[in-house]
Image (cartoon, grey):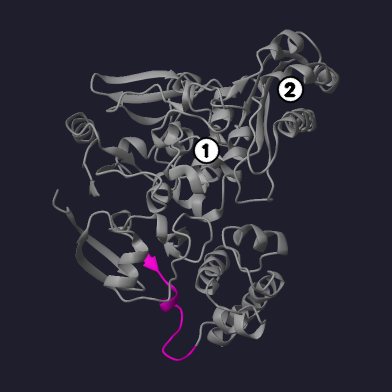
Amino acid sequence: MNVSKPQTIDDAVLFLTEHPDAKIVAGGTDLLPRINQKLEEHAELCYIDDLPEMCEVRAEQDGSIFVGASIRLAEVAEIKILTKYTGFLQAASKVASPQIRNQATIGGNILQENRCMYFNNQVPWSDVNHCFKWGGKQCFQYKNSKECVALFQSDVAPVLISFGAKAVIRGSEGIREMPVKDLYMQAGLKNLAHNDILLGVKLPPLFKTEYSAYVRKTIRGSFDFPLVSCAVRVCVDANIIKDSRVVFGAAGVMPAELHMSNEVFIGRKIEDLPLLADELQPAVSKIIAPFQDTRINAAVRKDMAKEIFIKAIAQICQGN
Amino acid sequence: MDKQMAEVKIKINGREYRDRIPSDMMLIDYLRKYRLLTGTKKACGAGECGSCTVLLNGKPIYSCITLAIQASGKTVETIEGLSDGDELHPIQEAYLDAGAVQCGYCTPGFIMSTKALLNKVSHPDEKCIKEALAGNICRCTGYHQIIDAVKLASEKMDQEADINER
């Protein structure tokens, strides 16, 4: 394996255009373990960690905040202009372990590969009976599935989606923006060309009064992937809910949004939030994919989603 | 395809080294094979156990999932950088005194995580210690002794600072 280190973002895009097999690496905490475990093989890596465009955090003229893709998860807590994006801070502080957070980047977290026990835990028969992730034509998770259904595990992405954040992407035709939500496609694929580089994310300005929370369920207190996670954001004016967004992580192949939340929440008083959340519980259960792994089964995952949704709402009410 | 080589310039335990290494070499392999600093241990290779923890620019990271070129131009501290000749660092002494070392394979990683914590917070409470050591796994001690060792190390470093002030 060869690792090349382009010196500028232009060089990096050019390098990726000329080397269609090269894989991007920055923090490396998602990709390098898979390479070490021989789950993946790459002839070429393109190392783009310390390009200046991707290392900055700045307030834009329209009030939004640009956070570079190379910002480390551990650094998020130290950035003053982000202190009111509570959910974002909570999510970044919960990822894996201190060592991983010192090394892993925001960009890498939201673009991390989906995980499945039949791939990442390397079951004994995976060498002969290949699943989709191994380049085969079957899925051990859902027997009749026509594509990979590995679980989306990012902690940061659900929160960014709840804030309506945009991904800033540098491609061969210049810089473009798209909602973070649109990065994700079926079968764990990302809506990016091979030579697209995620420069960072843009968080929109905060509403005058708004509350956000991120709650996740894990087997261990730390150093674990979420079994299921929930990001909630509620905008309030004069005690009346004006806007809301509820997004679940580890709910399927991509983050799942509870679109019904606005129908139920908007125009109601913030004090009524816990009662209104109870009404939404059956809807929460429906959007969680029945995914089973070595940790929990499908039914428990749905129950846990309801539980953490209620917990996140409780946090929002406490913040109020 | 020929193996691509890369130049690295890394300051390890206060001394600067320049080397020409394979571009895909992991930091742990560079430390162990090129610099013969075998105190840092390699175990899972997947960033799951913490035995390969070293400090990169003062912050703990897993050297088994870090490319050596990622450390180029930065400073690295390993377990070898702690003791002064035959004299152990207060953290190392505390680990021995508290019985926090059994097979010892995870110890260099734990000690480096402890060093990073005590550099930042001189008197951490138990919650803080547990959070700082969450990325290291020990299958022998059961962690209680390790937490005791961190508390003891914090006291020992205080005493040392007092002596130095006098």
Q: Earlier in the sequence, mark 1 or mark 2?
A: 1
* Kind of residue indicated by mark 2: Ser
Query: Residue placed farthest to the left in the image?
Result: B2
Question: Can you say whether B39 is above or below A35 in the image?
Answer: below
Question: Can you say whether A47 is above or below A60 in the image?
Answer: below
Residue A103 placement (x, y as % from top left)? 44, 50
Residue located at (63% from left, 30% from top): A291
Horizontally, residue B23 falls left or right of residue A237, namely: left
Q: CA distance from mark 1 to mark 2?
A: 21 Å
User: Who is closer to the viewer here, B165 or B113?
Assistant: B113
Residue located at (57% from left, 36% from top): A155
- Image quadrant holding the C terminus of chain B, namely bottom right
Element type at marker 2? helix
Q: Is residue A300 visible?
A: yes
Q: Is residue A238 visible?
A: no
Residue B127 position by quadrant: bottom right
Dots 1 and 2 on the same chain: yes
**What chain does mark 2 sit on?**
A
Residue A48 placement (x, y as % from top left)? 30, 41
Q: 10 Å neighbourhood of mark 1: few (<14), some, or many (≥20)? A: some
Residue annotated with mark 1:
A115
Residue A49 position by quadrant: top left
Residue A296 placement (x, y as % from top left)? 70, 39
Horizontally, residue A195 falls left or right of residue A112, namely: left
Q: Which residues are magenta?
A: B76-87
* Magenta run includes residue A247: no
Residue annotated with mark 2:
A285
* Kind of residue indicated by mark 1: Arg
User: Who is closer to the viewer here, B164 or A142?
Assistant: A142
Residue located at (64% from left, 43% from top): A294
